[in-house]
Image (tube, rainbow, N blue to C red):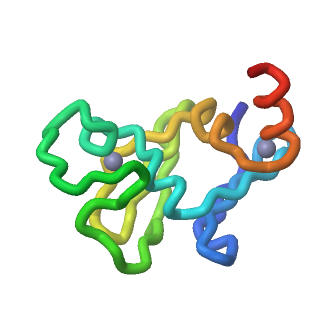
Amino acid sequence: MLPTKIKLDAGDGTLAIEWADGHYSNYAYADLRARCPCATCTGAEGRDAESKAPGAIPMFKKALRPERAEMVGRYAVQIFWNDAHSAGLYTFPYLRSLCQCAECSQRRAATG
Ligand SMILES: [Zn+2]
Ligand SMILES: [Zn+2]
């Protein structure tokens, strides 16, 4: 599944993605950043996290937002955050799995 449109500022601090199948996903910036799949954020590298509470955004408490997003090939989106973090490649299936809409939540609940 490919995104057809990525809207960085969809209002209320969210990013929106329109998918090729017509599905519409909305992501809160903080959620998206908390789920950054890069090695630093997932803790695979540099485990110096002194105060890395789950979901916390280290060293950045101001209004976090994505400045731009770029397609990486045909499989992922790279998000450039306003704190200069851009290491995370959000693959399309990953992004779709993060969709919080009622339909997707229901499907996830149904399949466990
Ligand atoms: Zn990251
Ligand atoms: Zn959905």
Q: Quadrant of residue 21?
A: top right
For residue 25, side relative to residue 13 (left or right): right
Indicate the quadrant of ligand 2 in the picture.
top right
Q: Observer-nearest residue: 59 or 19?
A: 59
Q: Observer-nearest residue: 64 or 90?
A: 64
Residue at the image point whose x is 33% and y is 53% from the top: 53
91 vs 35: above or below: above
Q: Observer-nearest residue: 11 or 102?
A: 102
Q: Residue 4's spot in the image, x, y percent?
A: 72, 48
Q: Residue 19's spot in the image, x, y percent?
A: 76, 44
44 vs 35: above or below: above
Q: Residue 89's spot in the image, x, y percent?
A: 42, 40
Residue at the image point whose x is 49% and y is 57% from the top: 69
Indicate the quadrant containing the C terminus: top left, top right, bottom left or bottom right.
Answer: top right
Report how many numbered discs are placed on residues in the image.
0
Residue at the image point whose x is 27% and y is 60% from the top: 58
Residue at the image point whose x is 26% and y is 37% from the top: 43
82 vs 37: above or below: below
For residue 53, side relative to residue 71 (left or right): left
